[in-house]
Amino acid sequence: MPVKDAQGRTLVTLIPGDGVGPECIEATRRIIEASGVQLSFDIQHAGESVFKKGIPSGVPQETIDSIRKTRLVLKGPLGTPVGYGEKSANVTLRKLFETYANIRPVRELPGVKTPYSGRNLDLVVVRENVEDLYAGIEHMQTPGVAQCLKLISAKGCEKIVRTAFEFARSEGRKSVACATKSNIMKMTEGLLKRTFERIAPEYPDIQSWHVIIDNAAHQLVKKPEQFDVIVTTNMNGDIISDLTSALVGGLGFAPSANLGNEVAIFEAVHGSAPKYAGKNCINPTAVLLSGVAMLRYINEFEAAQRIEQSVIYTLEQCAKEGVGTGDVVGYDKPNTLSTSAFADRIIKNLGHKSEKYKVRDYREIKLPKISDEPAFVKAKSTRVVGADIFVQANLQPAVLGPKIEALLEGSALKLKMISNRGTKVYPSAGAITDCVDQYRCRCILRDGAQKGATATLTDDQLLPVLAKFGASKELSWMHIEKLQEIDGSEGFTKAQGED
Ligand code: NAP
């Protein structure tokens, strides 16, 4: 719920951001103020300017305090060092305030010519926003092997799937497609698919279907009209939402909302586009439409409608006159409109409506309220049937295998197989694998590892094994993963080639 000040104005934390951010935010702010909505902006900072002050998170305490108070953020894009350095302050903000749903709509707009013009594209990517590879848990396991953990929770899946269906209902949409890579990642991506299939029958008014994410990318380019709402995991959603924005004219037109049960953050899909920074030439529409989504979120439906109608009318008029922002007509052309000139037109056109392009009739979106309990799934039974012990060893598999077997002698565990980057290499089945120095040794209970047995591996049995591995001069262990059976099903996948 919006927080208001004594004058009845809704409080908003405004983060101008980096690169082109301040220009887009300034244009948006002017247009929102011209629409007559009463907002009280608290200007705060995050991103590059904050990294420069030596705050490694990129999000200072004042910004956190402001958001805790306002619970509502309108932000420009934030720059993140690519391939090195600090973590993304965008992702930090999304995760700090558990904004688990990232809603990224795109629709065809008048005057914005694309190869798809005339096909009336109008679809939305609902991207899980806080889990997956974006948990950002990365390690160098050996000097030459990096690892990133892909964490997906049942609770996170339930929240995003329910949000996608509720969102579809709030916009009167007809179908939700769940796009996953569950053919390969059966536990993580598969969890989203299974959750989707369990929940979909609760929404009989909405058609539901599953599509493998790579085919979704293919279908989106070939026949995008078949999609209405797409729900997907964080990484997939990040990529396909850039793709969908390109279908309607590019990142200059792609808004987004990061929604959580406590806080909502509105921002464009695009980044800080540094090459255009400070040139007053960037298209502010994506940030502006994010602001429009924010107005709907705080129930300012009328002002949101007026601004959206003015954007559409302005684009129609620009097309008639043959003018537009640089991304539409080309930069540095005589008919190029600057960011501020384009914003001025939208302000002037407030109150005008397109005759052809309709604005959707929006209703409030009901975000799912899901238990705050950390233990969201309670298993009836779990038992540990073994452990994957990851070792660093500069040995070939045929040499390493017997050494691991010797280390396990006399223990509760036996070696089932060794894999290298997911492919079984010991005992060899004759595959040709280019091995690196990080191996997974799958060790299972000598007695009772089979399905349905009841024995469980105890720490008293496991720790001496690790100590033996640790004492070895030819290898070192850097990571272990217990192999669990949960309610009678294996809670781990096989290596490629493992029987
Ligand atoms: P980007 O900033 O999104 O820019 C990529 C390209 O998209 C631009 O060169 C431009 O294409 C086009 N573009 C972006 N915004 C536009 C707009 N408003 N109007 C018209 N065209 C627009 O992506 P990037 O260059 O990969 O990333 C730059 C920085 O932004 C990085 O530090 C990245 O981490 C960060 N980033 C932040 C966010 C966020 O804050 N949410 C999101 C993504 C990236 P043309 O070159 O074809 O003109």
Image (cartoon, rainbow, N blue to C red):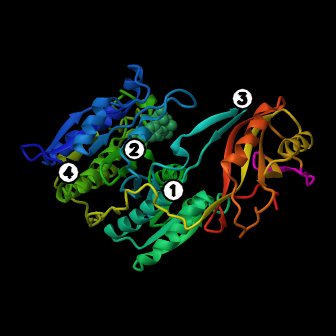
Name the residue that disc number 2 marks: 94
Within 8 Å of ligand 1, the CB of disc 3? no
Circle 1 crowding by C-alpha within 10 Å: few under 14, some 14–19, many from 20: some
Mark found first going from the N terminus, 2 or 1: 2
Residue type of the residue flagged with mark 4: Pro
Name the residue that disc number 4 marks: 2
Residue type of the residue flagged with mark 3: Pro
Within 8 Å of ligand 1, the CB of disc 4? no
Chain part drawn in magenta: 420-431
Task: Please state which of residues 341 and 436 is positioned toward the viewer in this rendering.
Answer: 436
In the rendered image, which quarter is residue 384 located in?
A: bottom right
The residue at the point 35 percent across, 51 percent down is 257
Mark found first going from the N terminus, 1 or 3: 3
Residue type of the residue flagged with mark 1: Ser
What is the CA distance from the residue labelled 2 to the residue labelled 4? 18 Å
Circle 4 crowding by C-alpha within 10 Å: few under 14, some 14–19, many from 20: some
What is the CA distance from the residue labelled 1 to the residue labelled 3? 30 Å
Name the residue that disc number 3 marks: 143
In the rendered image, which quarter is residue 391 located in?
A: top right
